[in-house]
């Protein structure tokens, strides 16, 4: 068992280093920071102007604009990452197929699920690191808010964002294991993202049991719950289920590849 985890750690370290020693990782991080900063600036100045306007009328009820800014920005980030994550996941296995190393991984003593777990852990860790500056400048920008912001909704929101990203990256990893073409892998994951968006849109336009069923399988619905501060165990279970499903399907895909070559 120790040998398995040592191999997982070795693959995890190698994969994580690849994001920091190649320009590709910095390009993705730079685009993500630029887009998220743009939207945060717009929301910040709009809500600041609104708070000044509303504050001039004592008859209007007070609103926690800092909290509203956090929730709105997290919703926007939830949409932005849907377009960033397919680019992050498209190289997870396609490069292994191109270099001919996927067959070595498939026939090595390391189990397929262990390799998939290490690769997913590395890309999720990289995504976590590029989230940290965004959290930092939010705290700095809202540090002087009155009333003072509570870190709890901020942390739960970003925890939900990390779970959403992990689920999509896990499914994207499975798609990348099916092809040696990074463009095909990215388009396939974009298609999955589009499907998730459509499912969420359908749930908003229906009622009854259909809405309940869709709400249980919609990642965006579960993410919205965490952004709203509703910490429901069913949402955590749904995210973990998607993550495990992606790892399982990836392991089966690599196993099928091994039998094709044998």
Image (spheres, grey):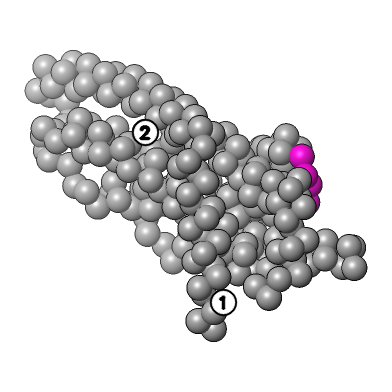
Q: Is residue 33 visible?
A: yes
For image coordinates 90% across by 68% down, the residue present is 262
**Front residue (pair 52, 259):** 259
Q: Position of residue 72 (x, y in %)?
A: 36, 34
For image coordinates 13% across by 21% down, the residue present is 55
Tell me if 177 is positioned left or right of 73 in this view.
Answer: right
Residue of label 2: 73
Q: On residue 91, which mark appears?
A: none
Q: Position of residue 5 (x, y in %)?
A: 51, 74
Q: Position of residue 133 (x, y in %)?
A: 31, 38
**Front residue (pair 162, 18):** 18
Q: The residue tagged with tag 2: helix, strand or loop?
A: helix
Residue of label 1: 4
Q: Earlier in the sequence, mark 1 or mark 2?
A: 1
Residue 88 placement: quadrant: top right
Tell me if 7 is positioned left or right of 101 in this view.
Answer: left
Tell me if 168 is positioned left or right of 55 in this view.
Answer: right
Badge 2 crowding class, 10 Å Cα cut-off, few under 14, some 14 to 19, many 20 or more, is many
Residue range of the region highlighted in magenta in the rendering: 177-181
Q: Position of residue 37 (x, y in %)?
A: 36, 26
For image coordinates 76% across by 70% down, the residue present is 107
Q: Is residue 140 magenta?
A: no
Placement of 174 over or under 34, stated as above or below: below
Q: The residue tagged with tag 1: helix, strand or loop?
A: helix
Placement of 184 over or under 262, stated as above or below: above
């Amino acid at each position: 068992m120790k040998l398995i985890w040592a191999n997982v750690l070795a693959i995890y370290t190698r994969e994580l280093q690849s994001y920091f020693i190649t320009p590709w990782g910095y390009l993705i991080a730079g685009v993500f920071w630029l887009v998220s900063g743009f939207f945060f600036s717009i929301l910040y100045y709009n809500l600041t102007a609104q708070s000044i306007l509303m504050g001039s009328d004592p008859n209007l009820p007070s609103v926690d604009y800092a909290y509203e800014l956090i929730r709105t920005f997290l919703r926007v980030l939830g949409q932005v990452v849907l377009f960033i994550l397919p680019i992050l996941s498209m190289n997870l296995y396609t490069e292994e197929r191109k270099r001919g190393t996927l067959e070595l991984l498939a026939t090595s003593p390391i189990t397929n699920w262990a390799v998939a777990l290490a690769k997913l852990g590395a890309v999720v860790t990289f995504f976590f690191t590029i989230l940290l500056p965004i959290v930092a400048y939010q705290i700095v920008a809202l540090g002087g808010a009155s009333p003072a912001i509570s870190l709890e909704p901020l942390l739960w929101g970003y925890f939900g964002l990390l779970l959403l990203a992990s689920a999509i990256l896990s499914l994207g990893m499975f798609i990348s294991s099916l092809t040696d073409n990074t463009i095909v892998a990215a388009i396939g994951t974009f298609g999955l993202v589009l499907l998730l968006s459509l499912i969420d849109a359908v749930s908003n336009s229906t009622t009854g049991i259909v809405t309940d069923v869709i709400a249980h399988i919609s990642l965006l619905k579960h993410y919205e719950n965490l952004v709203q501060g509703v910490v429901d165990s069913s949402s955590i279970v749904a995210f973990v289920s998607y993550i495990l499903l992606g790892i399982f399907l990836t392991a089966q895909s690599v196993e099928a590849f091994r039998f094709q070559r044998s």
